[in-house]
Image (tube, rainbow, N blue to C red):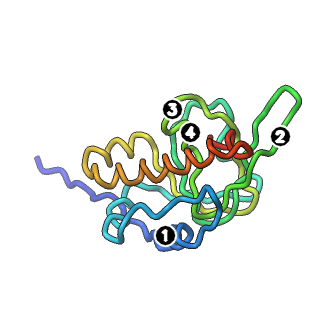
Amino acid sequence: MNLAITPPTKHDMQGLIHAILQATAEDSLSNPLNAEQWEVFSAYLQPCHLAAGQLLINQGANDRTLYFVESGSLSVHYEDEKGRLRLAIVNPGSVVGEGAFFSQRPRSASVQAAAPSKLWNLTALRFTELGNRQPAIALAVAMAAGAVLAKRLGNRRRRVAAT
């Protein structure tokens, strides 16, 4: 019996690549891949569109998805006993979700779209698959996301924004 195996869908990543190259924020992602690697990596990502005000990450959730921000802006909030406190705005060319992605702990803050936004998500399962099939690309992506996490942890104002 022959089963047809459909190849993974490759996406046009030019918007995300452009956002990364143009980003100027201290916690921006550095471009970890060359053009050929982006083409391979695109098959492991899924696009995600958010309307302004839409919740992306809920504080305390047990999810390890890493999100790459192509357009729009995201507001990061920490919920304490006194209510909601805005911590940071994340702009195009960066990532959110890196804290739980690496720590495998519950989300440390909530993230919602401050404006209509386009993101690309990388689930933990897809990252594991990427690591098994394309270890050099997985390592480059992990190092770039880890650098963002390190920058946020090194900046007292943005520390808890490591979601």
Give the mark nearest the N terminus, 4 or 2: 2
x and y percentages locating residue 20 in the rendered image:
53, 67
Q: Are marks 4 and 1 in contact (CB under 8 Å)?
A: no
Of callouts 1 and 2, the N-terminal one: 1
Mark 4 touches mark 3? (CB < 8 Å): yes
Where in the figure is residue 33, as x and y percent of width and height? 38, 64
Q: Residue furthest right?
A: 82
Left or right of 115, for residue 46: left
Label 4 belongs to which residue? 99
Residue type pointed to by label 2: Leu
Tag 2, which secondary structure?
strand
Residue 109 in the image: above or below residue 113: above
Crowd tier of the residue under label 1, counting other residues whose Cα lies within 10 Å: few below 14, some 14–19, many 20 or above: many
* Mark 2 lies on residue: 85
Label 2, residues with CA under 10 Å away: few <14, some 14-19, many ≥20: few
Q: Is residue 22 above or below residue 41?
A: below
Query: Could you say which is closer to the camera, residue 84 or residue 61?
Result: 84
Q: How far apart are marks 4 and 3 (CA)?
A: 6 Å
Q: Are marks 1 and 3 in contact (CB under 8 Å)?
A: no
Q: Which residue is drawn at 70% across and 60% down?
A: 73
| Mark found first going from the N terminus, 4 or 1 | 1
Q: Which residue corresponds to mark 1?
A: 17
Q: What residue type is labelled 1?
A: Ile
Question: From this viewpoint, which residue is outermost toward the top?
Answer: 81
